[in-house]
Image: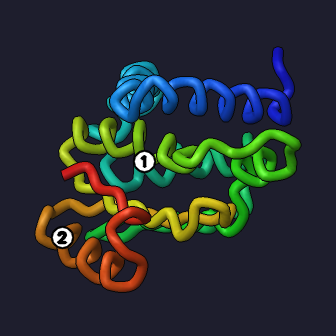
């Protein structure tokens, strides 16, 4: 097994290689990751809804030692990554981070959440800031309202959606 310190550095290099081939190649890679991750997540997201998402990311929080808080209610699931372990390791490296490194999470997560019938709004916060935050809504109207508020705060580039 490859240690996580090495894995994220390897991931970063893959992202840079694909980005040089064109942005569509990186997006195609994220779509492939979504296909694979759906095996582990999609049924629970469909069956258990927002609670299923909470349960999945609670397991990830523990397994990946994430400094994050998350919760859910009847309207949305919300996760706030206080310190992203992945981007933190990439930034603690002698190689330049991929400019779109942070897009990998919303790149696969958004697809799987859409397949489950939900609407995601992902705030990258900053491409060199190891923090992010995302919401998953039951209705597109709620997601659109959150997106509009975040775009006004941060701009288009840092806000990702699946709709």
Q: Is residue 13 left or right of residue 135?
A: right
State the separation of the CA atoms marked 1 and 2: 16 Å
Measured from the top left, where is residue 84 in percent x and y? 69, 56
Circle nearer the N terminus (1, 2):
1
Residue of label 1: 106
Q: Residue furthest top?
A: 1
Residue at 34 percent of width and 30 percent of height = 24
- In the figure, 16 relative to 139: above or below? above
Image coloring type: rainbow
Picture quadrant where residue 46 is located: top left
The structure residue drawn at horizontal position 69% and vertical position 45%, both measured from the top left corner, is 97
- The quarter of the picture where residue 75 lies is bottom left
In the foreground, 13 or 48: 13
Q: Which labelled disc corresponds to residue 144?
A: 2
Any part of residue 77 in sight:
no
Q: Dot 2 lies on which element? A: helix
Mark 1: few/some/many CA within 10 Å (<14, 14-19, 20+): many
């Amino acid at each position: 097994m490859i240690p996580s310190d090495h894995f994220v550095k390897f991931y970063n290099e893959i992202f840079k290689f694909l980005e040089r081939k064109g942005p569509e190649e990186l997006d195609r890679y994220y779509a492939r990751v979504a296909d694979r991750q759906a095996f582990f997540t999609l049924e629970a997201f469909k069956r258990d809804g927002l609670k299923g998402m909470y349960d999945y990311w609670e397991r990830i929080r523990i397994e990946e030692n994430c400094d994050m808080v998350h919760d859910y209610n009847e309207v949305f699931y919300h996760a706030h990554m206080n310190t992203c372990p992945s981007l933190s390791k990439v930034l603690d490296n002698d190689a330049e981070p991929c400019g779109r490194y942070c897009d990998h999470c919303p790149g696969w997560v958004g697809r799987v959440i859409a397949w489950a019938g939900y609407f995601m709004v992902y705030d990258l916060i900053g491409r060199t800031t190891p923090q992010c935050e995302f919401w998953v809504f039951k209705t597109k109207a709620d997601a659109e309202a959150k997106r509009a508020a975040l775009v006004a705060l941060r701009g288009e580039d840092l806000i990702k959606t699946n709709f």
